[in-house]
Image: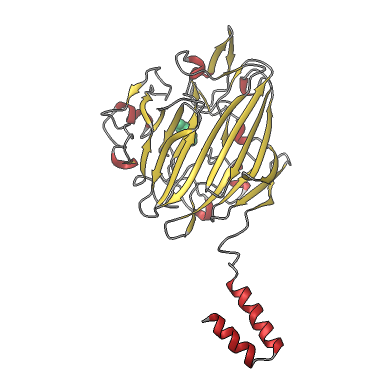
Amino acid sequence: MIVRLQAFARETMKPWKWAALACGAVLWSAPSPQQAPEPKIMKQGFGKTPDGVPVELYTLTNRKGVRVSITNYGGIITSLLVPDRNGRSRDIVLGFDTLEGYLKGHPYFGAIIGRYGNRIGQARFTLDGVEYKLAKNDGDNHLHGGLKGFDKVVWKAREYTDGDGLHVALDYRSRDGEEGYPGNLDVNVVYTLNDNNQLRIEYTATTDKPTVVNLTNHSYFNLAGEGDILGHVLQIQADYFTPVDQGLIPTGELRPVKGTPFDFTTPTAIGARIDADDPQIRFGRGYDHNFVLRGAAGTLREAAEVYEPSSGRVLRVLTTEPGLQFYSGNFLDGTLRGKGGQVYAHRSGFCLETQHFPDSPNKPQFPSTVLRPGQTYRSTTVFEFSAR
Ligand code: BGC
């Protein structure tokens, strides 16, 4: 049909008209840039810290319509656009539109957490016979690296593209004694977005004195982009969890999840048992617990999958870490206004923090978090997005 039309046009039209028509047809049949955007990284200014340090925002867009923005202030993922089952994109992480929002204080939205993600009991630990006292910022305990953790520092950033995807590499030197930790720690975190809709986070660190390290990312997800997260269906690859005391410090026990509200070995709605009459649920005010992941730590394997029924969005989490903190946003209370003026209500976001177990520096029976000079700390986590 097209061939016959072309022949007709060639016979009946002046040559310049035919050329213009043919050219138009070629343009018309080429895929529009919106259908298959070229992967790209955009860098913009994102304001300045109170002491005048400029901060950048890097936006990575892949060919499949996933777009992630990351700032070198705290290494924070500020937005993450993911298509639903009909191809409609929404931002699926909690956060703020501007740097000021983050500077005012917030519960670690999207940030890199260190030097030690999660809690250290009594804010102290002993290593090689020396006791180290850490900042107390959670009652008597130490949480997420202290008063000024890695979530509140400006990282040196570099963006680049190669065969593996789009990258933002972040570097930070945590000084000997910072928040009470021993040793200068050189930390490198690389975020990578590829065309398989995977956002990979690779952490490495080295030290010049024995220390402890446990790095993670603290993104709050809401796969519907609004509302509470109770209808999200969660599966965690864990047969055990680490029960906690009232201060959320693990007791040291590994408890089977079987027969408890912590059994997510088969896909289960987050809200199904979140208000169960269970002491562990009471201590956490919902879920705020470390799960002991199946399989060998150090190998990248599936940790969890979350499915949101109304949008069809799916988040798969893979990690090399031995543990996963599932936090159901219990401390969100509607006082924070985030992007576009959205109110972050109780349980409107959940975190899946890949990690070593909380309080490991005081629990010799847990996998070790000690890093010594000459060793390299390595950890990889992948957030993979799809829709069904
Ligand atoms: C912790 C919660 C804490 C939250 C801070 C989570 O990783 O497990 O207990 O309240 O971070 O926002």
Q: Is residue 128 above or below residue 369?
A: above
Query: To which quarter of the image does residue 14 belong?
Result: bottom right
Q: Is residue 40 above or below residue 281?
A: below
Residue 217 in view, yes or no: no
- Nearer-the-camera pick, 68 or 101: 68
**Outermost residue toward the top?**
129
Q: How many marks?
A: 0
Query: To which quarter of the image does residue 284 belong?
Result: top left
Q: Is residue 160 left or right of residue 380?
A: right
- Nearer-the-camera pick, 190 or 285: 190
The picture places residue 231, in percent across and down from the top left corner, at: 34, 47
Query: To which quarter of the image does residue 131 belong?
Result: top right
- Nearer-the-camera pick, 257 or 94: 257
Q: In this view, does 342 lie to the left or right of 285?
A: right
Residue 210 in view, yes or no: yes
The picture places residue 336, in percent across and down from the top left corner, at: 49, 46
Q: Which residue is drawn at 66% across and 85% down?
A: 18
- Nearer-the-camera pick, 293 or 78: 293
Q: Is residue 229 left or right of residue 106?
A: left
Q: In this view, does 379 lie above or below 31?
A: above
Q: Is residue 168 left or right of residue 260?
A: right
The picture places residue 160, in percent across and down from the top left corner, at: 69, 45
The picture places residue 70, in percent across and down from the top left corner, at: 61, 45
Rendering colour mode: secondary structure
